[in-house]
Image: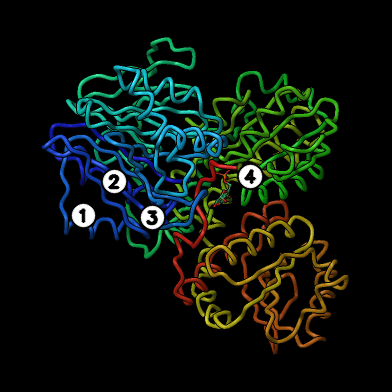
Amino acid sequence: MCGIVGAIAERNISPILLEGLKRLEYRGYDSAGLALVDSAGQLQRLRRVGKVAELEQAQRETVPTGRLGIAHTRWATHGVPCERNAHPHFSGDVAVAHNGIIENHEALRRQLKELGYEFLSDTDTEVIVHLLHHKLESCSDLSDALKATVKELHGSYGLAVICSRFPDRLLAARCGSPLVIGLGLGENFLASDQLALRQVTDRFVYLEEGDIAEIKRDSVRIWDISGQLVQRENVQYHEGAEAADKGEYRHFMLKEIHEQPKVVQRTLEGRLGDGQVMVEAFGPQAAELFAKVKNIQIVACGTSFHAGMIARYWLEELAGIPCQVEVASEFRYRKVMVQPDSLFVTISQSGETADTLAALRNARNMGYLASLAICNVAISSLVRESDLTLLTLAGPEIGVASTKAFTTQLVALMLLTLALGQVRGSLAVDKERQLVEELRRLPARLGEALAVNAAIEQLAEYFADKNNTLFLGRGAQYPVAMEGALKLKEISYIHAEAYPAGELKHGPLALVDSDMPVVTVAPSNELVEKLKSNLQEVRARGGELIVFADGRAGIENGEGTRLVNMPHIIDALAPILYTIPLQLLSYHVAVFKGTDVDQPRNLAKSVTVE
Ligand code: G6P
């Protein structure tokens, strides 16, 4: 949520800041700004409402240059998106860019006003820059002033700081919002995500919670939460090249949808043995631990929560383990009755989602056996703070609407189901062998499912003037329908709701008419006949159906029913396969409507604030 870039070099760094912001734009894009110390030693600033392209255009006209600077792309929390609220914020000769939320900003604002500071924005961030400016009156060094400042902040922050009195250094502080230092030769960088710096370096130092860093052209000093100087590991990072551009695709989302066979393959690699899942993939202590597991609690947000909902069907049906799934923002504030011998599982693409992280931290003292993170980012807070990890290997996901992260999460959760079933002896050896073989075939099946693209593109026009849609599914296809509805509303702004098809007659049927498309996922399985009855209920009321089904389901194209034929797949893996056409449907509807597919309004990729 929001993106930060900083640089100190001997060359003009404004193009580096702008390029970094463009790469981070998916994290927030309602306004952007940069601040530089110019050759005369003065702070210069440029801010614009809207996307980084607006800032870039303004930069072309005014050409601010400098060798030290910070930049920010914003997702508004406190104060509407406008130039006055865009970062960096100034106080005299100090400039700050901030990710996160300062919870005690009102009290600090009052104190600082009494000290004579004038507030020009509605943001919580402005208290930080004034407080830091005030601390500099009694501290001779910028890092000392920053240390004194953060002691008074409650909440979360990733901070990038410059001060024209100290043109040889860039300061950073991390608490609840990730920051990474990029190491160059005679130049160094800072960002909230290493992706922003890929064009300048592949060597990184990840700050830990409570760290403060002083970054000079040729040195980096880091103090930990207790104020001790520390050495943090220097990491070479090779991933991310594939995320740099859209390649032949018009949008990152379409590229990421088409990457699914490849990344599912990668997520399976090295984790399947001869007829069974390799339990060690979850860590050396996994086998011993899994043998003790009698219950599972899954916690996640958004699309990751839907992955958890699907996994519940698998864990109960295939591994025979009771499973509960809850959104993290509810779990973290609820009195939870923990079942004995429960494994606490978090699912997150980013590993930095504030609610999921908070839920994990609360869970530590609640009596769970252990925590397991299913996550796409190896160096994330969630991974660092969990006992066990299974990485999804989807590669960086740039489109705000999650696609390949979701399908790889499902693959990881199927591996978890099989591993638990195997270790606990609750899954028959033959059944595991069959599922492992089907998993090996899954990348090819996903490739076949992508072939429905052209048929779905033709459906898009039909949705363009619709305001509401129902998504139906039964069994594990119900959460697939939830994910389909989420995708459609996220990027095409059409209201979409998902229902278990059996609930139709308990309310939503009242809404059905020819203006309300009813999208249904209907693989041939033991529930398909029941589902067909539900579809009759829709047709009898003049409702229009869009049905995704394989030939064996016995559903036909005809009046009021638009059928998209899907390849047949074993029922257990159908949720993964049937996700693909729903992703494509939302994509093509959004393209037809002309909305911003990769950066839908009001949303951000990584929600690091509550
Ligand atoms: C945001 C994103 C969603 C994502 C959710 C959870 O809302 O826009 O795509 O599913 O956060 O994110 P996580 O990184 O924890 O999976």
**Along the line of sight, the residue nearer the viewer: 281 or 568:** 281
Q: Of helix, strand and loop, which one carries label 1?
A: helix
Type of amino acid at the residue the image marks with label 4? Glu
Q: Which residue is mark 4?
A: 437
Type of amino acid at the residue the image marks with label 2? Leu
> Split into 4 quadrants, where in the image is the C terminus?
top right
Q: Disc 4 vs disc 2: Cβ atoms closer than 8 Å?
A: no
Q: Of helix, strand and loop, which one carries label 2?
A: strand
Ligand 1 contact, mark 1 (Cβ < 8 Å): no
Q: Position of residue 6 (x, y in %)?
A: 30, 36
Circle nearer the N terminus (1, 2): 2
Q: Which residue is mark 2?
A: 34
- Identity of the residue furthest to the top in this view: 228
Q: Which residue is mark 3?
A: 31
Instruction: Please tell me in which quadrant of the rendered image residue 579 appears.
Output: bottom right
Circle nearer the N terminus (3, 4): 3
Q: Position of residue 336 (x, y in %)?
A: 82, 34
Q: Which residue is mark 1?
A: 59
Type of amino acid at the residue the image marks with label 1? Gln
**Along the line of sight, the residue nearer the viewer: 579 or 491:** 491
Q: CA distance from mark 1 to mark 3?
A: 14 Å
